[in-house]
Amino acid sequence: MGDAVRTRRLPRGVRERQMVDAAVRCFARQGYQAASMDEIAELAGVSKPLVYLYLGSKEELFTACIRREAGALLGAVAAGVEGAADLPPDERLWAGLLAFFTYAAEHPDAWLVLSPRTQGEPFAGELARMRDEVVGFVAGLIGEAAGEGGGVVTGRDVDALAQALAGSAESLATWANETPGVTAKEAAATLMNFAWAGLGNLMKSERWSPR
């Protein structure tokens, strides 16, 4: 009885975090359609009415999961880049990529919730907003690198490369998580080598053109 009373008296913020943690696990492993509020409530150790009271409908709960995990991912990438603020452009980009892949590897359920290929409407807007933030962040890093490189790299080049790099990172992170033995560092290095080689040529004004 005493344990039950103490559980009921947990602060609302703690209880909501437990519910969202449980929801992330359920949505990641079963998908939005198959996951049930009953299972989420059971995993969180609360009643289903309490989940509805605190976090609303299933759609609202999933949206809360996306927003929380997207914020955590973006925060991890920002912290990685800030830690390399005094380093050359390639090291800053590397720090951002490594933070991205490390977060995806260490939080596989969160990554599945955020993965565009596993979720569709009505959550495309939320996922698109997260991706836009990632693309903007990457564009800033590429723009800095291009500015210091001295070559002729246009704003359109920067935007296109940022889109390509963000899309590649998403696909590669999912592949790395699904492939035994692939570490976050290895995945990040693969993309860094691919991206930096191309960017390096652009910064030297060396462009590939079809014959």
Image (spheres, rainbow, N blue to C red):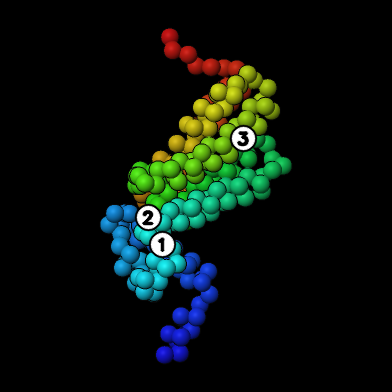
Does residue 99 appear left or right of residue 128 in this picture?
right
Q: Could you say where residue 183 lies in the image, as x and y percent from the top left?
A: 46, 49
Callout 1 secondary element:
loop
Q: Residue at x 43, y 43 (%)?
A: 125
Q: Could you say where residue 3 lies in the image, as x and y percent from the top left?
A: 45, 86
Q: Is residue 71 above or below residue 206?
A: below
Mark 3 vs mark 1: give the one in front: 1
Q: Quadrant of residue 202?
A: top right
Q: Which residue is mark 1?
A: 56
* Residue that extends furthest to the bottom in the rendered view of this protein: 1
- Tags 1 and 2 touching, CB below 8 Å: yes
Q: Is residue 99 visible?
A: no
Callout 2 secondary element:
helix
Q: Earlier in the sequence, mark 2 or mark 3?
A: 2
Image mark for residue 140: 3
Give the spatial CA distance, label 3 vs label 1. Answer: 37 Å
Q: Residue at x 63, y 27 (%)?
A: 146
Q: Amino acid at mark 3?
A: Gly
